[in-house]
Amino acid sequence: MFSVILYGRNDSHGYNLHKRAAISFNALAEIMSDPDDEILFVDYNTPDDHPTFPEAIHDTLTDKAKKVMRVLRIRPDQHVRHRLKTHLVALEAQSRNVALRRSNPRNRWILYTNTDMLLVPRNEKESLSDILGALPDGFYQVPRFEIPEMLWEAAFDRRDPVGNLAKLRDWSMRFHLNQVVHNYMPMKYDALGDFQAALRDDMFAIHGFDEDMILGWHCDSNLAARLALYRGRVDTLVDKLFGYHCDHTRVAAANNKGRATRMNDQDRFIWNVATPYVPAQAETWGWPDVEIEEIRLDRDTPYQRYSAGLDKAIEPATMPFVETSLEWQLFDDLTYDLPHTLPFVCDQVVTFPRTTNLMLVATRPDFVSSFAKAWKGMGFTGPILIPEECEGLPADLPGVARAPFAEQLSSAELFVFEFGLASQTATEPVRAGRQIGPLDKKRLRVVERLFKRAAASEADTRPEGRRVARRFIGVNVIYNKFWHAFTNYVGANINPFCSQVLAGPPREDDSLKGKVLKFRGRHAL
Amino acid sequence: MADIGILRAAIAPVRRLWRRPAAVEVAPKVGEDEQDAHAHFRDGLIKRRGGDSEGALAAFDRTLALVPDFADAVMERAEILDGLGRSDEARAEYERARRLWSELPPGAADRRYVYRRQGYFAFEAESYDLVRTNVRSKILPQIAHGNARLAHGHAAEALDSYERALKVNPKLTEVLALKGEALSAMGRYEEAIQIFDGVLAAHPQDVDTLNARGIARAALGRLAEANDDWRHQFDLLPQTSSAARACVAMRMANYSAAFNDFGVAISKEPNNAYWLLYRLTAARLAGAPTEPVTLPADDRWETLLLAFRTGQATEEALLDRADSPNRHAEARFQMGVLAVDGNPAAARRYWREVVDQGPPALIEFAAASNELARLGA
């Protein structure tokens, strides 16, 4: 019957976002009763190494919310063409249009709202699906009522949408929450963007949201203006349901700078709108030709993929714990515990697109074979690119492509550099004062040289069309001689030794030292 | 040809000129009741904004006493009653307003958006009038006001609104096109065509304006040029716009295309009785086999037309309810369709009446014009 369209990213937009959103997702799912109903959440520009926002809070969502939610992930590299035109990190019009294009075509209605809204049918026995199913064609709004921050934060249970809706029915009268704020036509009500129900056909006919609106604010008013022209009328659903907004102004959100807030031009996008249509984007709105990843919360979850991958690569531990040490005298010992390290490496990659081409530059054959199994087990379909310069590694692993480093560099979308000892065996003790042998030195020199070249020339060697810097994962680069080498080139956070892994984008260092490093790295000096 | 036929043919051009003003779409026929109802409605809005709920209710009651299907007033009553805590009463009124709106037949799908919805649009006209007094020198309030008036047949008021918008930006082709629509609705076809020519010079693929120019050209008897516009429109419309394609095919009397596209349109909008009626019509005129029809269980005008077409209503019953130029033309057109096989002369007569007296924007006007041309009338 209807598709709810929401957007956001895995950040901290306003006060206690996680609670607001969980309350809202669960409440929206609760009032769905048609099998075609869906919540489309566009996760816009969350960093590649983070999970999407709904994945990050999935444990606070009800089974029903997880079942009806489709997460459409727009990657930073898909946003980058807008980056210089806007101060915002999440774009409403683009997000909502991407979802509209991919919404269930069997649904008659599209509902635009936000991740802090609860919709309360006035008749408790009616779902929103029932309500919309009985409505004549039109463009409908409801007034937005505010919930004081204390109330939703202190009294709502995230996973009890039925109880939360019941509380709202009570509070609305007890605390006089229901104040209808009328607005100039065509907006009808204040804060109209929290409930705009339009026919899916109408949204396609008018070419979706205006994607020129990239400065934030007024996207809802622009839509109202255009739909009001197109439909001739703005209808109300105030008799059917009330909309409540979890107020969150204790802390200003990123797009709210008080009087200094940058906004889309009101005159252009509201008062001087002259047509329902946006013909300039008639063929392009919602990025019809762009492949958008879709993630479900009720199946094939990141945890399921992660554990499936690792189960293929490592056996469960047989001892309560293993030991290692970061004492100073062990600084040159590059042995590490592979079964312990691999889960942290997989953790770094599992959120990337499954089609990612990953370059793996390594010394240890067992690391390569284990990682390849895990990679495949996690459902990745992109190849593992291993430069021919890396000797002594398994030759015929499925999903592995071998070629000269220079050839592979511009295909790689993610890098793993592993700094271990080629000669380490699975049974020997870890960090017990092991010396580096000549073969180990030879293999490590190759890894280090290729790492520096890749990091120093990253910006110049990206795959065609890619504009976002690629991420470098360093394995076994904490508290040993490659710590400095790695962090000279990669902007990694400080990580605990136990994780064994550092990761980040190439460092942007315009100092003399940075320039020298870059020059040396490029030319392998 | 009988003497009367020769005489008719001889004076046809003169008759057309003589009858033309009656076919203009402007709605000067708005009765005093409706004017008074509108005044009461305005009074109710003012009272409501001023916090006088009881006074507003009384004003809306007066509105509805004069024009019972004035849905805008019903909706206002509903909101006031709801706000007063009389929610049970309000609920019935909300539903009534929605029912009234939904029962209005949709406009032709091939025309500009402003003509695709029907209603009084009194709330919109009043609201945008208020907005434009506060948000001055802006385009949207003027256009929205103009559209509300145009959609209800007040083309002169609409023209005034569009001209105010054009004072803000004289080059806006979207507003120029609307101005052309208003002029066309007022019967000022030559001026309208001149404007449409300019719009199409800038936007040759503007399907709505192609349709509008076709209508204006057809109104002036320039049927071949009108068909050119509609053919161009038909070619430009995507396959997904089945209803629009079907309507414009119907205008051109391209019945096989209309038959197919109305089939798709019906699958998307099964409750639109006009699509069913037109598909039946297209089938009949294209010589396709008749399909069984299940009549909707209501007494809407278009259902009556369907009943007539399927032999379940008489000509008298139909004409009894043909209480507007539009309905009259629609009825006469269907009479022609029924008659054409057995009595082409009668069909010709009915269609001639549609062309002489019907509003040129009607699909039936264009289809009848093409049929007459085909029959050599």
Image: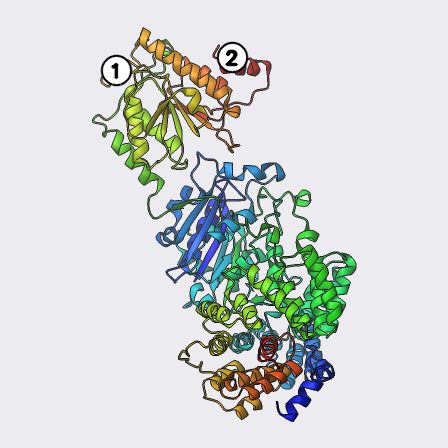
Q: Residue furthest left?
A: A318
Is A132 above or below relative to A76?
below
Label 2 crowding class (10 Å Cα cut-off): few <14, some 14-19, many 20+? some
Which residue is labeled 1 in the image? A429
Q: Quadrant of residue A190?
A: bottom right
Is A514 above or below relative to A151?
above
Image coloring type: rainbow
The disc at residue A240 is none
Q: Position of residue A266 (x, y in %)?
A: 68, 52
Q: Is residue B130 visible?
A: no
Label 1 crowding class (10 Å Cα cut-off): few <14, some 14-19, many 20+? some
Sequence-first disc among 2 and 1: 1
Q: Is residue A310 left or right of residue B65?
A: left
Q: Is residue A29 left or right of residue B110?
A: left
Q: Residue furthest front?
A: B1
Is A16 above or below relative to B311?
above
Residue at x 61%, y 57% (from the top left corner):
A277
Q: Quadrant of residue A305?
A: top left
